[in-house]
Image: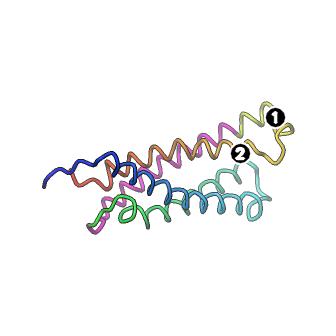
Amino acid sequence: MTEHKQSKKQIFYEILRFLLIGGFATIVDYLVFYFFNLFALKEINSHLNLTISTALGFIAGLIINWLFSARFVYHYEKKTTNKQFIIYLLICLFGLLVTELGMFLASVTFDKLYLTFIVRFDFYKLFFKCLMTLIVLIINYLGRKFLVFNDKK
């Protein structure tokens, strides 16, 4: 198999497609997160609510991403394998762990400092969710590109 080196233009468009699909998946993630956080699970413990809501949103985004990543983002023409899906899941689970840890640390820090009264509507949750999303975005792109949809194995 010949090695195909991507041009800067091809990489740029691949990243753009990744961001579009990732953006759509993130919107789904956030909608599911806020639905559970503000409505479905609002009666349970704050930290447990945050953990479950974050996980459910993340899983919804994960499913959307898998459905569109291979063909649309990476132009992967072969049929995906169970092994690829397992590696994809492991990358996503690592991302979920990073997200959950970041959200937990943010929540505990703000609760201990009693800063939530300063930041109305728990705005810090959205800020840290965005920060965790950015970090996981980089992890996901690199992991998928080099470990899941890479023909040079």
* Residue nearest the observer in this picture, 110 or 29: 29
Q: Which mark is residue 125?
A: 2
Pointer 2 or 1: first along the chain: 1
Q: Which residue is mark 1?
A: 115
Say whether residue 153 is visible. Answer: no
For the magenta stretch, what is the residue range? 78-106
Which residue is rendered at x = 66% and y = 56% of the image? 53
Location of the N terminus by quadrant is bottom left
Q: Which mark is residue 141?
A: none
Q: Is residue 85 rendered to the left or right of residue 136?
A: left
Under circle 1, the secondary element is loop
Under circle 2, the secondary element is helix
Q: Is residue 74 magenta?
A: no
Residue 70 position, x and y percent, is 36, 63
Q: Is residue 6 rendered to the left or right of residue 51?
A: left
Other-residue count near label 2 (Cα within 10 Å), few / some / many at <14 / 14–19 / ≥20: some
Residue 103 position, x and y percent, is 64, 43
Tag 2–tag 1 contact (CB < 8 Å): no
Picture quadrant where residue 73 is located? bottom left
Say whether residue 98 is visible. Answer: yes
Q: CA distance from mark 2 to mark 1?
A: 12 Å
